[in-house]
């Protein structure tokens, strides 16, 4: 049985995901970076099947995923020919590339309204029959609705300011699930609040579907979580935390725009108080764009604290991290878990899953915990629900 | 009720412990660096009472702990006058300061045999009535006996080559417990295998006592454990681990002597395979002595791995860490836990406690686990046994 | 013979300067951090005499420098009582504290016009008889005039938007020199373009005076200059440079305001092309404010390059640096050099001096060079001009 | 006109040199990492011609440089076919691979005496007609002779303990020069004291030849030199310096053997006192071998100091550096300079050249200086002697 996946945003993360699963299927790549690769899940990595891809960048729409991948990662990775079979389709824009040096057009521009665009998507998806829709588009400003009616009204009124692209896709996936009776798993690894939006969670429950999110936890944030847990367990008193991130991919470029940066700062900072128990002063955010670094970002982190007898210790962490593959590796699990969750009758959202894979885990009001704790809680949960096989 | 503590080795760790608990009792110091300070244990930190101190350095024997502390940490800490009431007594040497620039003499030199020295200690302890004996002496070469008779024979034969000072102290504490019927908790935070020596564990069981050990887990080792767990959970493939440690205290000076260094290298390296599941190539050991660094060591660590799509990530950690206070903070817990364990009828050794506090946890053959896991297992265990109060 | 100094901006730098020279005079402090301390200059460090101090912060104006110092550094340094003799006077504000959480009032607010304020200063200085005026006030947005008449007109028109406080002080010092016939050395260690403003340089030449500037070179910038020189000399091709700076003093707080940050970014970035010969992509700027770090900033820097055979090397530098003392140490030289230069008949500005001590050396259009080169050029120059004695 | 070069020790450095110059000749590689590439020297890089190669490893002797290079760097670099024309010849062993996991045999083993081996080399070189002989063999224990007669006697007596392989090669090159009347430049980039051995310098003067050495300055040592200069120029007082180096090439493997490590520690440490003016406590040496790191070593360095007002600053440097290419790039200059020096009538040794390119510059008793200073002194010297063309 296949796990049928649609990617929304055919950028670096999506491309690493697409290339990676094809290479794993061909037996040429070990599944390093896939957390649960060593467990036997209900669905194997090889069951994952890419059935659709959406973007709004005129340079990508109409190209095959193979062409996009060749251009993006062709110099560092072999790109499997199988990716020629998937063509990037036009998605909903809603300004999520605004201010960035790309030419973008959305279905709503072509069809005249967001509602028409959503309906067009639903029709396409009825043919593509996805089990999983993954949002890996550019980080955009977005606010939760919490009330279903407010979300519905925003669509009706074609309120393009209030409505984020993420919400439009989430709503489309819900309609698709409701119309067809097929459950869908929406995997949201960008900062838009979807799993933290009561409205979305409610709709997904109703449609026997699930939303997992928000904002994939890769790179410095989960590491910081575990470092803080390490300190908290020794009752060390943290004076401050500084964390710099700089990279040269378009994700970092997008995050130089203040309101997008703000979205990340929020999801990134949420760990401090949740883990330490007090809000240690911190500076944690994407710091800058430096083109030659490409997708291999540079991270620097400074933490200092009071130890026994009131003396002061100090820790500096520096990293060079391949940004997008890290998230792509998580998607390999999330796709498989997402589908199985709905099959096990788990609808709405699943905190135990979000707590490990996401920076700001839904549902609304959920606490962050250290990743190592979240990992063991996740394993327990997946065993209990039978998603990890005995 | 008091927790009566004897310190073996009045060095920096013992001194930070002695100074710290007095300052906490006087209300002038927050118990940062004491892992369980935020829990209510059967014994409070203020219940800890220092009743005896042993050393073999002629510069220390006969001085009060106050005098020793003034000299060692008087420039950075206020030294409470209450420490004037404890005088450093002569312990058993057995060569554990050999090759180091200190003039040392042990009871066995004065009394002619190790057996006589052990008996002298037992007599003293009958008066001091310790609940806890803590070994914080200089790291020395030591090998386990595993058979009780071999240990007994080594004492009988006055075999000063085979017998480590740590073993002599452990044996003395056992005799004291047996003779008096008072349980004792031996806390061994140096690399000598005591909690990993079947012979010692057996004797302690017999005497309704407990040995906790071996080698206190502070500084880079437990952090490395948690970093490796972090990587393992994401199925990243670790290429190699380099970890340098340099400091200017006498502990680092002692570790420049190859056979002592070897003792540490073993306890430090044991984490790699236990946590990753494979023996990633590593260089982990105390690397050098640099006097101006004093007790605030410099640590540098390099780890790199394969992530998703076969790409390579890299992590560097640098730290300045107050070496001795870190261990002193752990001793504050270990003293309290040690006494309560025997009161709860738990004898021999206690893996759940060792796994968090020790680099190479006994009993023999036990695995290391990441500290974050060990922490939660510890909390569960302490709640179950009632050592942490509801 | 004394070097009579006025400080403009009684902040951390000025305070470290004031405290440090008094401590050196009393023989309780070695002159570490003073570059030329090991040379015999015409004026000894002990010849420096603080004769006046200016600020616009209502918390400081009217207090003695002793009181200000006690509050600012009293917890980490002994503050000499001699500083009780200098009271902080009100200076010209011109909005240079705007947007910051301080209550400020300038002479121009009291006296109704900038011209009146300048004249008031000149009158005071005629009594204080400074040889050196040092601008160590908050970084402010400022643009050069280049034409003397434009500067004069801005004063006449009371054009408070066009005129920076730095320019007002510089103009006052010029008038003072012209009126009295006493040469003055204006030392500008903030980013305002004064030594790079043709108008200022011209006026100072005319008044047999000198302006040294701009923006004191301490911390990461001069180190980066020397690292880049190191790479350039080996013909390594630099891919990119990322440099983060974060601190908790009010200087960092001020630099969170974009237009002030811009001033620093410009002076900091000017080294790259000048030293490498090409404009390697870089991100170099004050990055954030984190209060607990205080005056001891955290710096992180990443540089990577192509080496022989086209392979890639990588360098990361991390620092904890006392920000203000570093600049105070330079001021000790600059005061002495400044006065001697005018005595040697060197007027306008002196590139050789600026090139070592300043981030963006005047006169306008001057190149940056690595600090090590600049140092030896400086020593030569000072020997040639007799400022360093044989 | 060609610069005819013989390589002694066909290891990684020699291989990067051989591959690099061929790639530069073919126009496929920019000469990054060659310090003087941007100057016009008397000899161009393209004039360098490899005419011979020596080794004693049975795995290499008899193979072509192409084969050796394919195996050593074939996975990361294209290996030019032109290297098929040079076959690795058997050199003099004198135990310089002893204790390492390689099977080695020297000419002296085949021919019965060191003298015979030296004579055989001289005969071969008369045919190969080298201008430059470069010693890039494994670091070996070696002591200077200082008296020519002692060196000559050691050869006569076949004193294989006293005589290092480096000295044997140096003596052979001298004999070759004397016999043929052709000047030779011996470039010694390993720690053996040759340029610091009065005996060798004297012989080379006599034979109108030159020896440049000792121990190529790449990696952390020259960078440390420049960092210390940076600190010294600001009169900062350095408390201590810790420098760790770990790598996975056979050079690091060799340096795990104590007496070889000692050779490096000496050349590496000589900078501290020479540059700072006092012997700041330091730990500077190759620290360990970690195979997966390969030729890209990891370096970590900690320096801290007293700044103005007695406060303390701290600096940490971490690097990943391609070890062998760095030295190969220097060899490209040294070959060209070496030949031209003899043509300009400069014999014996040349401190100005050594001071920049070598860790421990000859002649005996010479001081180290920071590299940036040495660089400008070198440029002046090369211009004055006409080696850099106007
Ligand atoms: N480690 C990680 O890379 C990581 C971690 C957490 C979150 N994320 C998030 O994942 C997202 C993707 O990251 P990336 O590195 O692939 O970025 P990217 O810039 O390479 O790709 C984003 C893609 O989305 C497309 N897009 C933008 N708006 C769209 C819309 N409305 N509909 C469809 N497509 C749209 C863009 O054209 C682009 O192709 C970002 O939001 C990023 O913040 C990434
Ligand atoms: N973070 C840490 O500091 C840490 C962590 C784990 C283990 N340890 C271990 O703790 C021990 C103590 O560390 P420290 O920093 O206090 O060292 P230290 O050198 O300051 O103190 C050791 C003391 O033990 C004394 N001693 C030596 N042999 C003795 C003997 N036979 N009997 C009695 N006293 C003896 C010495 O004279 C000295 O006073 C060391 O073995 C160290 O390896 C320390
Ligand atoms: N290493 C360094 O600290 C360093 C290096 C280069 C440049 N600088 C520059 O030196 C200046 C001083 O640094 P600091 O750390 O002392 O900052 P600070 O904030 O501690 O002090 C600045 C002082 O200037 C005063 N001020 C503001 N506007 C004024 C005005 N118009 N007239 C008189 N006083 C005024 C403020 O009230 C404050 O007391 C800053 O501009 C900073 O950018 C510092
Ligand atoms: N950046 C650098 O790599 C650097 C810097 C300074 C000095 N060095 C020195 O350069 C030398 C070469 O470094 P490498 O990385 O190429 O090492 P390597 O181990 O790769 O090569 C050394 C070669 O010398 C050969 N050899 C050993 N003894 C010999 C002898 N008696 N005659 C001829 N050949 C002999 C070995 O078989 C080997 O092939 C080392 O001594 C190293 O310490 C290297
Ligand atoms: Mg990203
Ligand atoms: Mg220690
Ligand atoms: Mg500053
Ligand atoms: Mg090398």
Image (cartoon, coloured by chain):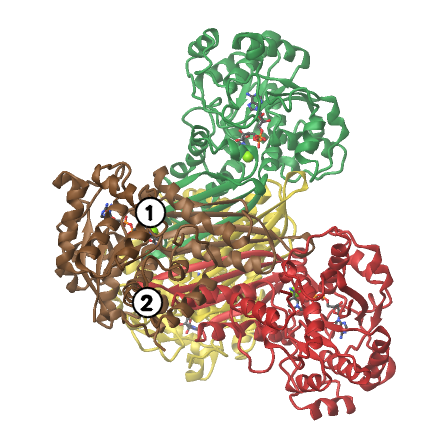
Chain colours: A green, B yellow, C brown, D red
Is A213 positioned to the left or the right of C139 in the image?
right
Per the image, the residue denoted by label 2 is B73
SS for dot 1: loop
Q: Nearer the viewer, mark 2 or mark 1?
A: 1
Parent chain of label 2: B
Mark 1 CB in 8 Å range of ligand 3?
Answer: no
Q: Which quadrant is home to the C terminus of chain C?
A: bottom left
From the top left corner, tell me how far across and down residue C167 is, in percent: 27, 46
Q: Gap between marks 2 and 1, in whole Å?
A: 47 Å
Between residue C167 and residue D162, name the one nearer to us: C167
Q: Which quadrant would residue A307 be assigned to in this image?
A: bottom left
Residue at 33% x, 47% y: name it.
C192
Between residue C77 and residue C360, name the one nearer to us: C360
Q: Do callouts 2 and 1 mark residues in contact (Cβ within 8 Å)? A: no
Q: Residues within 10 Å of mark 2 (few under 14, many from 20)?
A: some
Parent chain of label 1: C
Is B170 positioned to the left or the right of C189 in the image?
right
From the top left corner, tell me how far across and down residue D238 is, in percent: 41, 68
Residue at 32% x, 78% y: name it.
B62
Residue at 24% x, 53% y: name it.
C174
From the top left corner, tell me how far across and down residue A350 is, in percent: 51, 25
In the rendered image, is residue B143 in sight?
A: no
Per the image, the residue denoted by label 1 is C192
Q: Residues within 10 Å of mark 1 (few under 14, many from 20)?
A: many
Q: Which quadrant is home to the N terminus of chain C?
A: bottom left
Mark 2 CB in 8 Å range of ligand 2?
Answer: no
- The correct choice, above or below, for C322 with respect to A257 in the image is below
From the top left corner, tell me how far across and down residue C30 is, in percent: 30, 70
Is D188 positioned to the left or the right of C265 in the image?
right
């Amino acid at each position: 049985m296949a796990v049928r996946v649609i990617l929304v945003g055919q950028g670096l993360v999506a491309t690493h995901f697409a290339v990676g699963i094809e290479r794993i299927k061909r037996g040429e790549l070990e599944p390093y970076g896939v957390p649960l690769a060593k467990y036997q899940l209900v669905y194997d990595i090889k069951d994952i099947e890419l059935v659709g891809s959406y973007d709004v960048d005129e340079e990508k729409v109409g190209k095959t995923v193979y062409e996009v991948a060749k251009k993006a990662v062709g110099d560092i990775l072999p790109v499997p020919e199988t990716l020629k079979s998937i063509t990037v389709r036009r998605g909903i824009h809603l300004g999520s590339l605004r201010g960035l040096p790309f030419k973008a057009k959305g279905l709503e521009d072509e069809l005249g309204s967001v509602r028409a665009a959503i309906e067009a998507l639903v029709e396409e998806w009825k043919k593509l029959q996805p089990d999983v829709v993954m949002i890996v588009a550019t980080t955009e400003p977005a606010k939760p609705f919490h009330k279903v009616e407010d979300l519905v009204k925003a669509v009706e009124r074609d309120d393009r300011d209030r409505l984020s692209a993420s919400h439009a896709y989430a709503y489309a996936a819900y309609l698709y699930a409701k119309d067809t009776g097929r459950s869908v798993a929406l995997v949201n690894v960008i900062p838009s609040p979807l799993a933290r939006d009561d409205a979305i969670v409610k709709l997904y429950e109703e449609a026997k579907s699930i939303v997992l999110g928000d904002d994939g936890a890769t790179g410095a944030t989960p590491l910081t979580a575990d470092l803080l847990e390490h300190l908290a367990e020794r009752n060390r008193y943290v004076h401050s935390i500084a964390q710099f991130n700089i990279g040269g991919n378009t994700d970092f470029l997008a995050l130089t725009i203040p309101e997008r940066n703000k979205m990340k700062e929020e999801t990134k900072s949420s760990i401090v108080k949740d883990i330490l128990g007090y809000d240690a002063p911190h500076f944690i955010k994407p710091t800058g764009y430096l083109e030659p670094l490409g997708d291999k970002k540079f991270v620097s982190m400074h933490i200092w604290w009071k130890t026994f007898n009131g003396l002061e210790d100090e820790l500096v962490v520096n990293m060079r991290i391949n940004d997008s593959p890290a998230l792509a590796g998580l998607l390999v699990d999330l796709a498989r878990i997402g589908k199985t969750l709905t099959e096990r009758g788990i609808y709405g959202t699943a905190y135990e899953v979000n707590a490990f894979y996401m920076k700001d885990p839904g549902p609304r009001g959920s606490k962050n915990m250290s990743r190592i704790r979240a990992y063991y809680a996740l394993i327990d949960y997946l065993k209990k629900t039978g998603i990890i096989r005995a």
